[in-house]
Amino acid sequence: MVVTGHFVDSNWKLQKRVLSFLHLSPPHTATEIVDTFYKSLNEWDLENKVFTISVDNASNNDRAIKLLKDNFRVRKQLFFGGKIFHVRCCAHILNLMVKDGIKSIEFVVEKIRDTISFLNASEGRLLRFADVVHQLHLPTRKLIMDCPTRWNSTYNMLTVALQLREAFTSYSEREVTYHNSPTEDEWTKIEKVCEVLGYFNEATNIISGTEYPTSNLFLSQICTIKKVLDDSSISSDDFVRHMTMKMKEKFDKYWGECNLLMEFGAIMDPRMKFLVIEFAYPMIYGDQSGQNIAYVRTLLYELFEEYVRNFEDEAKGACETFRLRKGSTQGGSHSLSTSHEGGSNKYSGWLDFTAFVSEKTSKKPAKSDLDNYLEDGLEICPPGKTFDVIGWWKSNQAKYRVLSRLAVEILAIPISTVASESTFSAGERVVDTYRSKLGIEMVQALICGSNWVRALYGLKGRMKEEEDDDEIEIPIPCT
């Protein structure tokens, strides 16, 4: 089991660290997951710092999260009442939805796989197929054999096959032993499926293709997918309608209710703010959009008030400290040591001013940070330019003292478990056939050490989704 910590450091940089790579004893029950997770928290002294937990959509994970929620609630360490404690992996939900779509053409997908295996089994067949591609002047010079467990790999295989559909048909007329060429009706079905899956592929690349995706990327992709599913579910084409209805059922199951992280992340993007909720909700929730918009606004202010209380407690603590220092200095106590320029311990009036500032700034202003932020205009980002949302909050932290802290902590919440899954890819390279006897502690030391050293020197690890497809080059015939 991998435990990965996500946080924003003192330099306002989004960070990720592998905290534990633990052996999980069977059976993998919810209680075993919770016990192993708490072991990691205790080792790192993080029991009081857990904000959210992102997991895949497995039943034992759901039960484990419920147990953790109860434990944190009893110990009064559950932030915001646990309303955003459980984060479901967005990439995993997309994967479940897409698999339902691909099932509708599973028999055609098998034909494409068998065709590629047939061609790759013999150099002579591949050369004859290359002759056909050359004669038809098709630009594609490769075939892709997918990995069945990765739906986007299957999508890539189908899109490449579509570009070579004329070659498949022509080759079947020349090769008497080839019997797996899709019919025209089957090619049409592949085309319709790929048209829908293209939107899912784009969303997956944005959510999973970035090493540190921030939660503001979530809502816009979900809106796009919702619109595609809604349009396709009322299509006049029976095949498209039947395919997308199954996918729509999965969408409603996981995103039919308000997903607060999705909304809060989008609102904390200064290019969108609350206007994105007013725009997106009628598209997602229809007649219930007004009620859901009011619900999100209420909870947003509740979350902000919780941060304000924490900020005020810190300010009061700082104010009391300055008062103690001031009283100690005026009383002639020699136990207080103050450091000034030049190394002198002589008292200056700066402590008085600091205490005065702390008292003044601890008073609640007429308008909150959140009110000012929502009323200010949207940030304009030129098309094509990369927008650093964390960097924007760093630049505006003086203007939004409390809200900037809330924003970066919301944005730092991982919306997928890709970061953890990529660790298992590294684990396969560490515990290979030649090092299969490594101890559990040594494996964890190698995995964590590699991750920490890469982070220290700014070296990016390879993501799980970046694994290459099995590409088969089509040779160019000699003229």
Image (cartoon, rainbow, N blue to C red):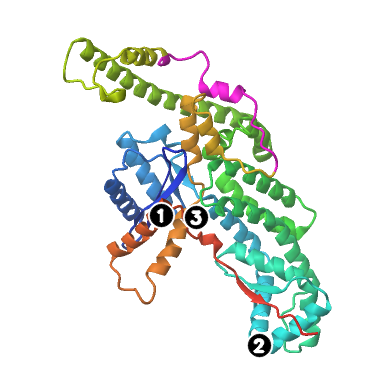
User: Which tag is nearer the camera, tag 1 or tag 3?
Assistant: 3
**What amino acid is at disc 3?**
Val
Per the image, label 1 sits on a secondary structure element best described as helix
Question: Residue 346 appears at what percent x and percent y?
Answer: 24, 17
- Position of the N terminus by quadrant: bottom left
User: Is 43 placed above or below 431 here?
Assistant: above
Per the image, label 2 sits on a secondary structure element best described as loop
Residue highlighted by disc 1: 60
Q: Residue at x 66, y 78 (%)?
A: 116
- Mark on residue 122? 2
Question: Residue 235 appears at what percent x and percent y?
Answer: 77, 52
Question: Residue 143 appears at what percent x and percent y?
Answer: 68, 74
- Does residue 386 appear to the left or right of 477 in the view shown? left
User: Is 330 placed above or below 309 here?
Assistant: above
Q: Residue at x 31, y 47 (%)?
A: 41
**What amino acid is at disc 2?**
Ser
Label 1 crowd (10 A; few <14 / some 14-19 / many >=20):
some
CB under 8 Å between discs 2 and 1 = no
- Mark on residue 273? none
The magenta segment is: 361-383
- Does residue 335 appear to the left or right of 266 in the view shown? left
Q: Main secondary structure of the magenta part?
A: loop
- Name which quarter of the figure residue 28 lies in: bottom left
Residue highlighted by disc 3: 418
Per the image, label 3 sits on a secondary structure element best described as helix
User: Is 73 placed above or below 250 here?
Assistant: above
Outermost residue, left direction?
A: 334
Question: Residue 110 appears at what percent x and percent y?
Answer: 65, 74
Q: Earlier in the sequence, mark 2 or mark 1?
A: 1
- Position of the C terminus by quadrant: bottom right
Decide whether residue 380 is among the magenta residues.
yes
Q: Earlier in the sequence, mark 1 or mark 3?
A: 1
